[in-house]
Amino acid sequence: ERTITGTIVSEDNKTPLAGVTVRVKGTRKITQTDANGKFSVKVNPGEVLLITYVGYTTTEVKPGEGSTVGISLKTADNTMGEVVVTAM
């Protein structure tokens, strides 16, 4: 088991994304990015990181031999264009 650290940014403008969920696929290991888009999680060899964030495409990343990863998230195409709020 080793610790992977990384930074997650928006692909559009390269700004750090806070509150992104980083999960080790198939396990209960989960963390979120801080205000600077940084995270840290322990992984075993061969495990995959599942990156999810509202409004962005879910991404799977297999960490390489290093202990640091940089991840860019792509904006999802299926975002809502309009919301109507009603009251009774």
Image (cartoon, rainbow, N blue to C red):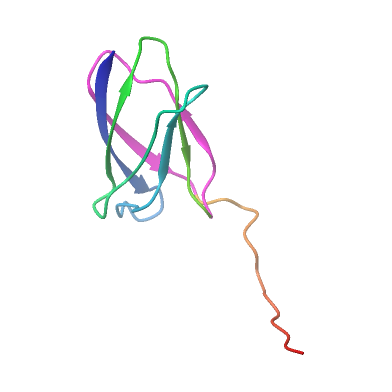
| Observer-nearest of 50 and 26 | 26
Q: Residue at x 51, y 49 (%)?
A: 56
Q: Quadrant of the N terminus?
A: top left
Apparent side of residue 18 relative to residue 74 in the rendered image (left or right)? left
| Observer-nearest of 86 and 73 | 86
Q: Residue at x 43, y 16 (%)?
A: 47
Q: Quadrant of the C terminus?
A: bottom right
Q: Is residue 33 above or below residue 42?
A: below
| Observer-nearest of 45 and 80 | 45
Q: Residue at x 32, y 51 (%)?
A: 14
Q: Picture quarter containing residue 44?
A: top left
Q: How many marks?
A: 0
The percent position of residue 26, horizontal first and vertical second, equals 52, 21
Q: Does the magenta segment cover residue 70?
A: yes
Apparent side of residue 7 relative to residue 48 in the rendered image (left or right)? left
Apparent side of residue 47 relative to residue 38 in the rendered image (left or right)? right
The percent position of residue 61, horizontal first and vertical second, equals 43, 26
Q: Is residue 5 above or below residue 32?
A: above
Q: Does the magenta segment cover residue 6?
A: no
> In the image, which residues are magenta?
55-74
| Observer-nearest of 52 and 31 | 31
Q: Residue at x 62, y 59 (%)?
A: 79
Of all residues shown, which one is farthest toward the bottom? 88
Q: Picture quarter containing residue 49?
A: top left
Q: Is residue 73 above or below residue 65?
A: below
Of all residues shown, which one is farthest toward the right? 88
The percent position of residue 39, horizontal first and vertical second, equals 28, 39
